[in-house]
Amino acid sequence: MIKKAIVICTVLLSLNSAVFAADWIRLNITNTSKYIYLDHDSISKNENYLFYVIRYKDKNEKEKTVYLKYDINEDKIGIIKSKEYNADKYESPQVWDNSFALMKKVSEDSFLNNINMFVKDDEMVQKLTATRQMRKQNAISNNKELIQKYNEKYPGMKDYISAVEKDIRKNWKLPVTNNGGVAKVQFKINREGKLISCEIKHSSGNKENDESALSAVKTTEPFEKFPETADKNLKEINILMTFDYYVLDVNKKQE
């Protein structure tokens, strides 16, 4: 059997509310030391070929994106293109037509073989897609409840806190060395939109994960000033944001 623990990269704004930062899924593969991410949105399939994008760090510690083409019938794989990864500019391919690649036989011991085994498993990909959609819907529902609770604590701040959450989400960049875990960041914003404090309240156990969570909050500053609807005596707000880093296990088939 192939062991696949289907988990998804999310970010939560306290009280178990989740919003999705990206469609990169960190893969845990037993026969490689590389940190591999698969772009779930990039997976495309026709009668003869599979297409998808992965990213990883090369031997020079540069993060790369690799656009791959897999021949289902011939069991061959080829690289359409490879380039340095830029989180701000990357977009999932929408059209793969006429994509050329020099095709080679896939080695059974190759980590690419493990990825192919998952990507070409229609049932598993469908389950992953369904799981992601369910989590997104649950995130929307939970987030509405959370914002309402914050609004009860800080009257007139519902829309403001929602905007803060969305801005931080945009600035959250998953580290390639993500090993999973949960990081909780507590931060304070004053009436002028200045970040007063920002600290890890619970470590994920991974330094890069913790740093990416802190960076997501810090790089969002300056925040907007408090709205006119806010209580005039409200000087600052205190928010707890939880960053969940999940990993998808894609291990070799065990006889």
Image (spheres, grey):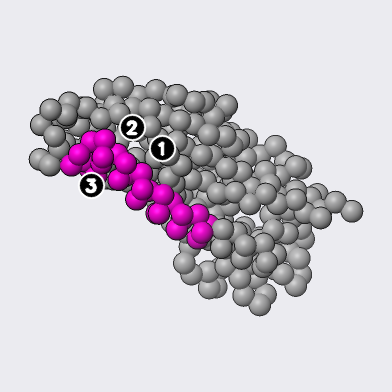
Residue hosting label 2: 239
Magenta span contains residue 44: no
SS majority, magenta:
helix
Amino acid tagged 2: Ile
Q: Which residue of the protein is positioned furthest toward the front in this rendering?
A: 152
Mark 3–mark 1 Cα distance, whole angstroms, equals: 16 Å
Tell me, yes or no, if residue 112 can be seen here. Answer: no
Amino acid tagged 1: Ser
| Depth check, front residue: 171 or 162 | 162
* Residue at 24% in and 44% down: 158
Give the crowd class for mark 2: few <14, some 14-19, many >=20 residues within 10 Å.
Answer: some
| Depth check, front residue: 1 or 138 | 138
Residue hosting label 3: 159
Q: Which mark is residue 14?
A: 1
Q: Is residue 8 left or right of residue 253?
A: left
Magenta span contains residue 158: yes
Q: Is residue 154 left or right of residue 171?
A: left
Q: For mark 3, give the secondary structure.
A: helix
Asked whether disc 1 touches disc 2, contact meaning CB atoms under 8 Å apart, the reply is yes
In which image quadrant can residue 173 be found? Answer: top left
Expressed as whole percent of the image width and height from the top left, the position of residue 249 reads 68, 47
* Residue at 67% in and 68% down: 122
Q: For mark 2, give the secondary structure.
A: strand
Q: Which residues are magenta?
A: 132-160
